[in-house]
Image (spheres, helix red, strand yellow):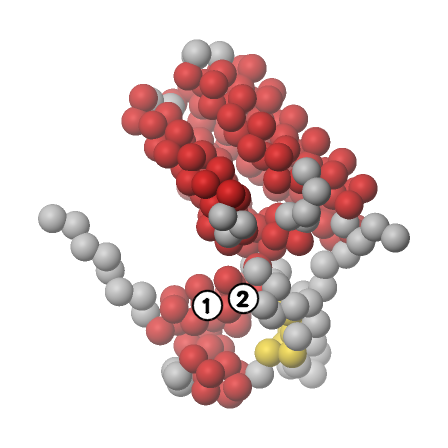
Amino acid sequence: MSFAVPLTRREAVLRQLREEIVSAALPAGTVIKDAEVAARLGVSITPVREAIAQLAAEGLIDIAPNRTRHVTGLTQKSALELVDVMMVLACAGVEWGVHNLTATHLERMRARLDDFVDALRRDDVTAAGAAGADFSTIMIMASGNRELQTHVDLVVARTLRLLAHTARGDAWQVWVDGYTETLALLERGECDAAVARYRQIYRDYRARVEALLYES
């Protein structure tokens, strides 16, 4: 029998603040005050400070020299740089992992792809982002390179935030089409073609971000 391990207060605060930043419930520039967050979430200051330190490491919160904390801004330049870094990390993991994928891995990827598409139909950007990240993570984890996954984890929240900001237009369709075609290639055993198709997702998405984000 399996059971869910309860979140620690630090983990609960971290998850809540991360979701609020990714979904823009806490927009860029919002000042984060420990005491206010602690009172709002009904916890002590300590788990709030620990969560903020983690979010700063993930690049979602900036800490100024005077110790003021605010939600990191999102510019077109930073967005494009993020896409480039994520492409390098994720595509390396996928390239190293695809030859280790089993039928069970592919079944899990199919399930997460279905979840991804369903969440988009419901306009649930947060759930869609999580399902899409899991789709890629299954391939990256199959590489067996835990160090790479650690680095991916540090930028994935910022990537989800960027996806939420570019949810209009056809930006999400880039991922739907790319994931669908990548999985179809993997199911046919065409691993090299699947890696190439997966890499193309990032190229196509980067072009959408360049044209869409903060358009004048």
Q: Is residue 176 visible?
A: yes
- Image coordinates of residue 58 in percent, x first then y, are 56, 59
Check disc 1 and report its element: helix, strand or loop.
Answer: helix
Left or right of 1, for residue 78: right
Q: Nearer the viewer, residue 205 or 47?
A: 205
Which amino acid does the dot numbered 1 rest on?
A: Gln
At x 32% / y 69%, what residue is drawn?
8
Residue farthest along the front direction in this orientation: 122
Left or right of 141, for residue 178: right
Left or right of 75, for residue 97: left
At x 47% / y 18%, what residue is drawn?
184
Q: Nearer the viewer, residue 139 or 174?
A: 174
Q: Is residue 147 visible?
A: no
- Image coordinates of residue 213 in percent, x first then y, are 77, 49
Mark 2 is surrounded, within 10 Å at the Cα level, by few (under 14), some (14 to 19) or many (20 or more) other residues, namely some
Tell me whether the residue at label 2 lies in contact with that at label 1, contact meaning CB atoms closer than 8 angstroms: yes
- Image coordinates of residue 100 in percent, x first then y, are 38, 23
Q: State the mark number for residue 20.
A: 2
Check disc 2 and report its element: helix, strand or loop.
Answer: helix
Alpha-carbon span between mark 2 and mark 1 = 6 Å
Asked if residue 53 is positioned above or below residue 80 in the image, the reply reads below
Residue farthest along the right direction in this orientation: 216
- Image coordinates of residue 45 in percent, x first then y, are 44, 84
Asked if residue 165 is positioned above or below residue 177 in the image, the reply reads below
Q: State the mark number for residue 16.
A: 1
At x 66% / y 75%, what residue is drawn?
30
Which amino acid does the dot numbered 2 rest on?
A: Glu
